[in-house]
Amino acid sequence: MKIIRCRKRADAIPKACATATIVALGLVADGYASADPITPSKLPQISTVDERFQSYNVEMLEVTGGRFWKPYKDIMKTSAPASDHVAGAASGTAAPAGMSPDLYQYRPPIDLTNRCLRALARNLGPAYVRISGTWANTTYFTDAKTPPKTAPAGYNGVLTRDQWLGAIAFSREVDAPIVTSLPNSVGARGPDGVWRPDQARLWLAFTVAHGGTIAAAEYFNEPTLASMGGAPKGYDAAAFGRDFKVFDAFMRKEYPRVKLLGPGSVGEADAPWSVASGGYGEMTVLKAGELAAFTGDADAFSYHHYGAASERCTATGTSAADALSEQWLGRTDKTLAYYRAVRDKAMPGKPFWNTETADAACGGNPWAGTFLDTFRYLDQLGRLARQDVKVVIHNTLAASDYGLLDESTYEPKPNYWGALLWRRLMGTTVLDAGPSREGLHLYAQCLRGKPGGVALLAINNSRSSSSSIDLATESLRYTLSADPVQSGTVKLNDAVLKLGPNDALPELRGQATAAGSISFAPATITFLAIPEATNAECKG
């Protein structure tokens, strides 16, 4: 992996605009106007999110090294030389049950000491880093100075002390406590088949002893697809319930400060596109409703969302032509609605954590690394913030096509720039900006770092029509665009975003915008900072 230099550049929150005596916002687009103007000072609070709401995943497989989803640019190439295949086998990175090895490509362990990687991650903080994934279910931790060359019986991978020390150091450096899951494979069980916490106890004790923070944990990754994820053959909901009881008692006694999440289901929705309805691998599905019947003691209801399986794994995914459609963007809501019904029955009142999400499972769509996916990325954050989802963890920070960063150079992809603007501007108090419609998805939250201020996010997902709002006060405008929209390069207020000398972040400058009508061109994303909104909900 190429190592590049990077130094942190902390940009300040935008300077306040001049105080306005009138603050009024109305919607006017394609002949539509709201019945009552929307006034930022009076937008009501509808929810709150965690300070680390926007977070990211580093796959356990990245930490250990192994075969992960092959990038599309390499899809027609040999995935790795013979020596890499041997290394992958030695480190326990066999393909999950039912998956073709041709879908994967070997990577050496990620260099979590890389200065650029750390600086770019730090600028998204505070956040959570989720170190988990399918391969975590079958990973064996050893604190031996000389680790075994092959995984013990019942495991597929080895996590060494040095690798985990690197993960702990990364977590501390970038202000991202760890969210994880525990090994669940045959090796983690007694002769009776019941899960035992011996491995988890060793690993978690080592973490704490070396200054690591485990903020939250799931019993294991994606029990919906338990057999595919390494659970014993024939594993069912009753076995999950039996084992979750052991996990719950162990964690509550020995690690009472760690939030417990469950059930961690994936891919269910009342729709044919849902991953668990025919996406990939061995698709024996344990229903979330059956699993959640046992997870009532968890602190939050966790679930994963993918709008489809990518074309690596299925021919029925979503095309780039549909990436801005209401149907595609609305899949976020459909998955949440499905799990909300499960939550309300089995875990009433528990908040939601979306612990893994991206545009598509199996490494992302071919256009996941372009500006086209930034609409899904930011729209999803806006939707979920309104609906009692406290944390959203993107998959991944820097692996395969859906990574926020290029996995070889760590160059930011368009989604990273969208994530950075969200982090700089969107606070933790969520406001009601009214309903969205095609051409204008409007979200509002308190402006980060500015008491009384409001931040608006306006997404024009129409490819052909402009929309506009009428804002009777000055604001700072941050518009993201790309030409073509399916481009790996994104502009902020018509200036290309890229790392500067020594790979420093550019200054993200808002464009002073006068009161009056503000137009949004087709296929653009705009943040508006209104520091002087004087919204009482944002005073805290």
Image (tube, helix red, strand yellow):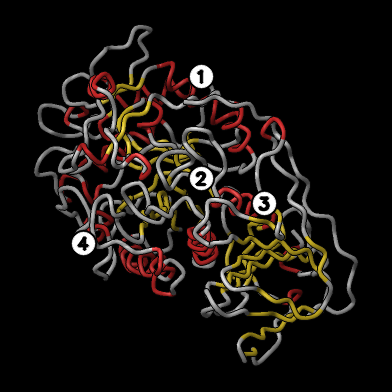
Residue 141, by quadrant, is top left
The answer to whether one can see residue 451 in this image is yes
Is 538 above or below relative to 126? below
Q: What residue is pinned by disc 3? A: 496
Residue 43, by quadrant, is bottom right
Q: Are marks 2 and 1 in contact (CB under 8 Å)?
A: no
Q: What residue is pinned by disc 4? A: 277
Percent coordinates x, y for residue 353 in the rendering: 44, 53
Reading the chain from its start, which is encountered first: label 2 or label 3? 2
Alpha-carbon span between mark 3 and mark 4: 40 Å
Reading the chain from its start, which is encountered first: label 3 or label 4? 4
Q: What residue is pinned by disc 1? A: 210
Is 316 above or below relative to 142? below
Q: Amino acid at mark 3?
A: Val
Task: Look at discs 4 and 1 and give the one toward the viewer.
Answer: 4
Q: What residue is pinned by disc 2? A: 404
Alpha-carbon span between mark 2 and mark 4: 27 Å
Q: Are marks 4 and 1 in contact (CB under 8 Å)?
A: no
Q: In the depicted view, which residue is nearer to us: 357 or 6?
A: 6
Secondary structure, mark 1, is: loop
